[in-house]
Amino acid sequence: MKIVLLGPPGAGKGTLAVKAKEYYAIPHISTGDLFRNNIKNETELGKKVKAILAAGGLVPDSVTIDMVKNRIAEDDCKNGFILDGFPRTIAQAEALAELCDLDAVVDFVVDNEDVIARLSGRRMCPSTGRLYHILFNPPKVEGKDDDTGEDLIQRDDDKPEAISHRLEVYAEQTQPLIDYYKEKGLLVDIDASGKPEDVFENMKKSL
Ligand code: ADP
Ligand code: ADP
């Protein structure tokens, strides 16, 4: 199964992808995680995209498309994959259509207030990328990862200035994909306002 998770930053796509990858036994490909790993490892790509991510802008299409093309050509993707955070522009969607046929595009429907609350409380384990929320999914010990005990971090782009910019970028560049995929008959809307377990049930039923 080849699926795309679509929705604004903070909609809960990454959280759901972790559940879905176990359930469907296919890899979770998050372009944000791929970029962040490149930044952490100080690769050439990482150096190129660091400032863009910190400001909440979009990495150029050509760079992003090449990265995804290489990733989905890997062996573990032969039975399908969950794309999280890609495509984010019409040009990326068109490039993806050249690479494969999708089974569904799951659109996370959640209002702006929830998105802002989710983003501003998001915390992450720097080495594993495991996600937490200070109120909705707190770690066992405040500020520490449950498994590794590392200090949790807040992403630079989850600070207020970058959040509002990212929501504008989403509205301008990514939201048009909703109509694009609706016209192709691939769009599945899911109510993403409830708890992650409920959202996952909605997603399983819709797929
Ligand atoms: P979120 O989970 O909050 O939606 P991501 O982790 O998906 O954020 O992405 C973080 C950042 O990585 C984006 O703000 C953008 O700078 C960059 N990025 C991720 N995916 C893409 C993409 N498909 N096209 C361009 N830039 C991207
Ligand atoms: P996205 O990948 O769409 O940017 P995330 O999965 O990273 O979103 O979720 C953003 C934040 O909201 C995280 O801190 C996560 O723990 C929290 N979160 C995710 N799903 C829910 C939910 N259904 N209800 C409440 N909080 C959630």
Image (cartoon, grey):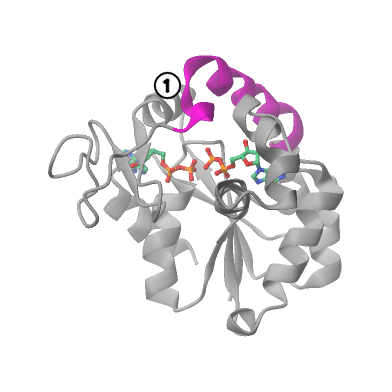
> In the figure, is residue 197 to the left or right of 68?
left
Q: Is residue 76 visible?
A: yes
- Range of the magenta residues? 155-174
For ligand 2, tell me if the residue under mark 1 lies within 8 Å.
no
Residue positioned 22% across, 57% down in the render: 147
Determine the secondary structure under disc 1. helix
Q: Residue furthest front?
A: 42
Identify residue for label 1.
Answer: 113
Q: Position of residue 97 (x, y in %)?
A: 81, 64
Q: Position of residue 1 (x, y in %)?
A: 58, 76
Q: Where is residue 202 in the image (x, y as percent from the top left)?
A: 38, 56
> In the figure, is residue 62 to the left or right of 68?
right
Three-letter amino acid code of the residue under disc 1: Glu
Q: Where is residue 14 in the image (x, y as percent from the top left)?
A: 46, 51
Give the camera-side residue of 79 and 160.
160
Is 150 placed above or below 8 here? below
Q: Does the magenta stretch include residue 206?
A: no
Q: Is residue 170 magenta?
A: yes
**Residue 114: quadrant of the picture:** top left
Q: Residue furthest top?
A: 161
Q: Is residue 183 visible?
A: no
Give the camera-side residue of 108 and 138.
138
Chief secondary structure of the magenta portion: helix
Residue positioned 63% across, 28% down in the render: 56
Residue positioned 37% across, 34% down in the render: 122
